[in-house]
Image: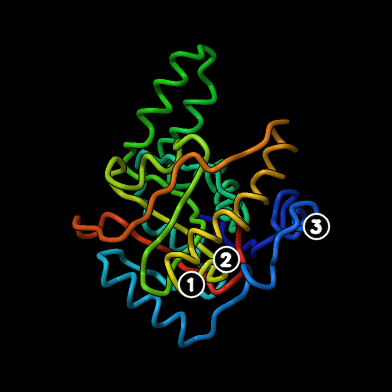
């Protein structure tokens, strides 16, 4: 099998760097990289909450880790995520060397609106659901938010296996900081993306905080030592 993970992290049209000026965000505060001691402390805190952490040095390494986590032929669904796009997951899914069952492709191919909506509801219970995150507290809580809940619905229980990918730039000191990061950084950037892609504004309609996972091995966080996503 050819190695399809060689492409390193690459800014896309909708990466944060291309939206920051219009979004008016404080990147100096909300897009900082933590030092090694903080990363080590945070990883330990996350794992103490029942979430497995794989620490990747680069986006290319993170993509290989993600591919290794999903067995050949598995049913896969992913939420919209700039982080996943930046590590190259969209490209791998298109090439699909492991012959995954791409739930997202099934949904987008459905022309009937009601059936498409029903498929989207079922997709949160996919065998493997992938998503980015919006913030991680040093105390170990992992925070996600979106407008409709199409991604967040998989997080608490529905997905058999939840694979989260995040840049270490999303680590903040406290859970209060994590929620503030969602409002003051992730939302303005996503709002800019939504206006450009869909022609409509975004909003935070749902928050999910992963504070404890009791099902061993269900959730894996691939934490990358690079600035990724919002």
Q: Nearer the viewer, residue 209 or 197?
A: 209
Check the image and report above or below for 186 versus 151. below
- CA separation, marks 3 and 1? 29 Å
| Rendering coords of residue 205 (x, y %) | 49, 39
Discs 2/3, front: 3
Residue 56's disc is 1
| Rendering coords of residue 19 (x, y %) | 75, 53
Residue 215's disc is none
Residues at circles 3 and 1 in contact by the CB criterion of under 8 Å: no
Residues at circles 2 and 3 in contact by the CB criterion of under 8 Å: no
Residue 6 located left or right of residue 210:
right
Ranked by sequence position, the earlier of labels 2 and 3 is 3
Residue 50 located left or right of residue 210:
left
- CA separation, marks 2 and 3? 24 Å
Give the position of the C terminus as an image quadrant.
bottom right
Check the image and report above or below for 116 versus 226. above
SS label for mark 2? helix
Residue placed under numbered mark 2 in the picture: 59
Residues at circles 1 and 2 in contact by the CB criterion of under 8 Å: yes
At 30% from the left edge and 60% from the top edge, which residue is drawn? Answer: 211
Residue placed under numbered mark 3 in the picture: 21
Farthest bottom residue in view: 37
């Amino acid at each position: 099998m050819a190695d399809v993970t060689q492409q390193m992290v690459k800014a896309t049209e909708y990466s944060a760097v291309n939206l920051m000026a219009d979004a008016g965000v404080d990147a100096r505060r909300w897009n900082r990289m933590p030092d090694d001691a903080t990363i080590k402390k945070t990883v330990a805190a996350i794992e103490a909450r029942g979430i497995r952490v794989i620490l990747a040095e680069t986006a290319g390494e993170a993509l290989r880790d993600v591919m290794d986590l999903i067995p050949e032929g598995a049913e896969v669904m992913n939420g919209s995520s700039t982080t996943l796009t930046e590590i190259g997951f969209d490209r791998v899914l298109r090439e699909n060397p492991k012959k995954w069952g791409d739930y997202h492709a099934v949904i987008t191919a459905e022309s009937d609106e009601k059936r498409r909506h029903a498929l989207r509801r079922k997709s949160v219970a996919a065998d493997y659901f992938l998503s980015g995150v919006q913030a991680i507290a040093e105390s170990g809580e992992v925070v996600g938010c979106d407008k409709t809940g199409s991604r967040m619905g998989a997080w608490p229980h529905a997905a058999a296996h939840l694979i989260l990918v995040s840049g270490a730039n999303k680590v903040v000191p406290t859970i209060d900081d994590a929620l503030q990061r969602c409002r003051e950084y992730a939302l303005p950037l996503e709002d800019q993306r939504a206006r450009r892609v869909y022609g409509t504004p975004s909003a935070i309609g749902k928050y999910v905080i992963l504070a404890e996972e009791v099902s061993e091995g269900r959730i894996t966080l691939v934490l990358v030592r690079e600035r990724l996503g919002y």
